[in-house]
Image (spheres, rainbow, N blue to C red):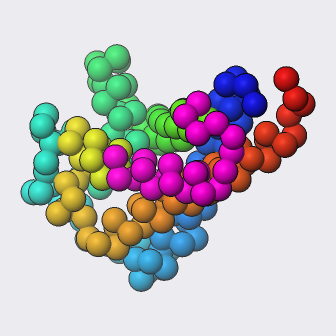
């Protein structure tokens, strides 16, 4: 399979993996947290991160996801003011889907042929390197000590789900594409 095919299969696989990750957050994460969706609005008010490991200070607002923080910060830098609520939500989704698809393309370039085991390993690697390392170092989410163990487990589960869906989809795309 050519590099172009690998990247294309990874890109599509990354989009499917992002969709699967979203389903994980909707269906599985509440079970791991031990709460139902109805309980979500009754959580404690988010607070400033007292466990920050960021080298540049806290960039996320209390309760804001890392993708929402990236979208908001980019918008503020380019537009000179904070985005509205709907724009914030759209920016967060755009960052999430862009990261998922882009990471999938990187997987295709690095891993070659799609493979569920390689995909799962890639997802776990993203969790360890990006979600547990780079993102808190950039102040885009709370530091590791500021997140309960169940939160870390959920993020691992979400990235494992992403990686499995990525690897399976890339394998299927490879089988569907005509030979070079």
Residue under the point 37% across and 25% down:
75
The image quarter containing residue 10 is: top right
Q: Is residue 127 above or below residue 73?
A: below
Q: Is residue 39 visible?
A: no
In the rendered image, residue 80, in percent from the top left (x then y), is placed at 28, 18
Q: Main secondary structure of the magenta part?
A: helix
User: Horizontal and vertical percent for residue 6?
Assistant: 68, 32
Image quadrant for the N terminus? top right
Instruction: Decide if residue 46 is in sight here.
Output: yes
Instruction: Check residue 114 for magenta coloring.
Output: yes
Q: Position of residue 76 (x, y in %)?
A: 31, 25
Determine the image quadrant of residue 24: bottom right
Residue 89 highlighted magenta (yes or no) = no
Image coordinates for residue 130, horizontal then vertical, percent:
35, 44
> Residue shown at 28%/41% (left/top)?
134
In front here: 51 or 127? Answer: 127
Near-viewer residue (162 or 95):
162
Answer above or below: position of 95 versus 114: above
Q: Residue at x 40, y 77 (%)?
A: 33
Q: Is residue 132 left or right of residue 58?
A: right
Is 56 or 8 nearer to us in this picture? 8
Residue farthest to the bottom, as pictured: 34
């Amino acid at each position: 399979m050519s590099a172009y095919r690998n990247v294309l299969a990874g890109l599509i696989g990354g989009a499917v993996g992002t969709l699967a990750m979203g389903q994980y957050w909707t269906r599985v994460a509440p079970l791991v947290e031990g709460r139902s969706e109805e309980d979500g609005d009754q959580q404690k008010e988010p607070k400033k991160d007292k466990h920050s490991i960021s080298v540049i200070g806290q960039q996320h607002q209390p309760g804001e996801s890392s993708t929402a923080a990236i979208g908001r910060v980019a918008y503020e830098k380019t537009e000179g003011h904070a985005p509205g609520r709907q724009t914030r939500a759209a920016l967060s989704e755009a960052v999430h889907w862009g990261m998922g698809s882009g990471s999938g393309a990187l997987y295709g370039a690095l891993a070659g042929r799609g493979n569920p085991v390689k995909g799962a390993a890639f997802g776990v690697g993203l969790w360890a390197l990006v979600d547990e390392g780079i993102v808190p170092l950039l102040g885009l989410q709370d530091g590791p000590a500021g997140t309960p163990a169940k939160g870390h487990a959920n993020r691992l589960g979400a990235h494992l789900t992403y990686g499995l869906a990525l690897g399976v989809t890339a394998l299927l795309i490879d089988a569907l594409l005509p030979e070079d």
